[in-house]
Amino acid sequence: MSTFSTPYAIAVVGAASGIGQAAAALMARRGAKIICLDRNGQGARATADEILATGGEASAYPIDITDRISNSAVWDSVIRETGQLHAVVNCAGITGQTNLKAHQVDPDDFDVVYKINMLGALLVSQAVLPHMLSKNYGRILHLASIAGKEGNAGMTAYSATKAGLIGMVKSMGKDYAETGITINSLAPAVIRTPMVAAMPDAQVTYMTDKIPMKRCGELDEAAEMISWIVSPACSFTTGFTFDLSGGRATY
């Protein structure tokens, strides 16, 4: 179990719901100061308020990680607030249009998915890396997907951009391997979020049949892994994609 000595500031992009929200709450309980970031600014604020109500430290900012100017300004504010930003967890991602053969994919939709899943991850990293380099310490974690490893039928844009994210993390991890900064990704299979819980049982069964454990992952399982990956304890792993797929991953 990873605990954080104070002050240890962690920014969570996508903190309004799902995996980001669960990770933010867990890491706050373990002593980290959490900066909640989300395109849904009200949702980010709600997560921060929940952390504050239970005695944790948190703040919130709305963010659009695809907008180069506003994205940079938000991170400047976060760094001023924290003094040192120790870690970033980037959970932002969209699937785009699905259930389409590759020849049916709308290039405009592909571009939207690319801007959030890949370009946004690059812009987040570029915004915080100079600061982390000045401190000789940092942890960056981007949420990828099993789709980026294996490819999901009917999800060309999502699979391609998550695969690209995994490649980008491999490269960036090597770029900063001697600096005290680690850059990794996490590749979940289907996780039991509220969205999944609302799906028909038959659809959930179809997805879990591909998982050797024959079940969805749970939010607390994702949060536990994230908490460790961005902690000081995870110090000799970089450029790596952690598996969270119940045995589905093949590499």
Image (tube, rainbow, N blue to C red):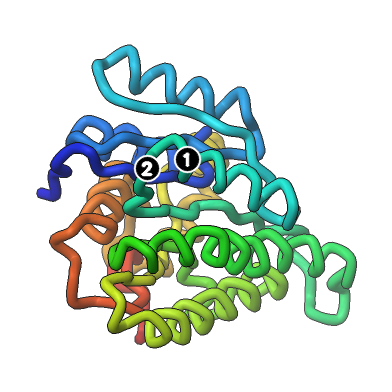
Which element type, helix, strand or loop, lies under badge 1? helix
Name the spot of residue 150 as percent of width and height, x first: 50, 81
Quarter of the image with the C terminus is: bottom left
Question: Depth check: 16 or 197 in front?
Answer: 16
Q: Residue at x 26, y 61 (%)?
A: 229
**Dots 2 and 1: beta carbons under 8 Å?**
yes
Horizontally, residue 1 falls left or right of residue 110, namely left
Question: Depth check: 165 or 183 in front?
Answer: 183
Horizontally, residue 115 falls left or right of residue 124, namely right
Q: Residue at x 53, y 49 (%)?
A: 202
Q: Residue at x 18, y 70 (%)?
A: 235
Question: Relative to 231, does residue 179 appear above or below in the rendering?
Answer: below
Question: Relative to 70, does residue 118 appear above or below in the rendering?
Answer: below
- What label does residue 80 carry, if any? 1
Q: Amino acid at mark 2?
A: Gly
Q: Amino acid at mark 1?
A: Arg
Q: Residues within 10 Å of mark 1 (few under 14, many from 20)?
A: few
User: How far is mark 2 from mark 1, CA to CA?
Assistant: 5 Å
Looking at the rendered structure, the number of numbered marks drawn on it comes to 2
Question: Relative to 221, does residue 125 appear above or below in the rendering?
Answer: below
Name the spot of residue 240 as percent of width and height, x first: 34, 78
Horizontally, residue 150 falls left or right of residue 105, namely left
Task: Give the farthest residue toward the top.
Answer: 53
Image quadrant where residue 138 sits: bottom left
Question: Depth check: 201 or 33 in front?
Answer: 33
* Residue that mark 2 sits on: 83
